[in-house]
Amino acid sequence: MTTHEQYTAAFWDERYGSSERIWSGEPNAVLVAEVADLAPGTALDVGSGEGGDAIWLAARGWRVTAVDVSGVALERVAARAAAEGLGERVTTRAVDLFADDLPGGFDLVTMHFMQLPGAERPRLYRAVAGAVAPGGTLLIVGHDPEGMPPEAEHHHPPDMFATAEQLVGELGDAIAGWTVEVAERRGRDAVQPDGRPRFLYDAVLRVRRPGRMGPSRA
């Protein structure tokens, strides 16, 4: 299988279709930490999966557009949003990040653990940054290369992991003049698929675009 095949609708529809649920349904911890005290506005959740982050944001007053390559995943997002009375706050949209344009003009754009090929990452992350409205926030979280288990290479070649500082450099002029609020390696306890505990590091990047006042910290 090529790296790009891991990002196709066919690949992810098959994976989601093989199980009733593959993620926890809970929001990512970094999202909660970094966004909990932002005033709600419009949000774009890139690579939303089954919607843990999108639902959490919507429940806190955000109007969320959840995008993913998998129609199966997006059906689950929409169904959960409806079941929790959040259907009017969550919109789903099928997007292939490698081929389609992203919608833009969002107060918050967030993307978590969407590990991208090193050669493609600058172009794709710059496209994601372009979806942020003036005054808005971009939050990117990925696996930092430090401490990644060797078995991770089975799914992700080493060049798919980057530090927050590398991401700043790769975004380059796409975030020229933006305020880098957080760019750090952040440790956390995790559990491997076989149940073994492991300590991992996340690369956390939060930047704010200049312009009109968007959601601000209380």
Image: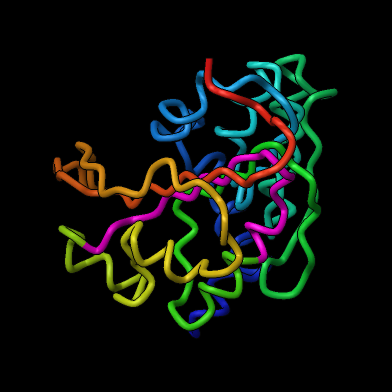
* Residue 140 belongs to the span the image colors magenta: yes
Seen as rendered, the residue at the extreme right is 88
Q: State the image quarter where residue 98 is shown.
A: bottom right
Q: Position of residue 125 (x, y in %)?
A: 57, 64
Q: State the image quarter where residue 15 is shown.
A: bottom right
**Residue 128 vs residue 145: left or right?**
right
Q: Position of residue 165 (x, y in %)?
A: 34, 61
- Per the picture, the main secondary structure of the magenta-coloured stretch is strand
Q: Position of residue 107 (x, y in %)?
A: 70, 37
Q: Position of residue 89 (x, y in %)?
A: 79, 25
Residue segment shown in magenta: 127-145
* Residue 84 belongs to the span the image colors magenta: no
The residue positioned 15% from the left and 44% from the top of the image is: 199
- Using the image, determine if residue 50 lies above or below residue 218: below
- Using the image, determine if residue 27 lies above or below residue 218: below
- Front residue (pair 57, 212): 212
The residue positioned 63% from the left and 50% from the top of the image is: 46
The residue positioned 50% from the left and 85% from the top of the image is: 2
- Front residue (pair 118, 173): 173
- Front residue (pair 135, 48): 135
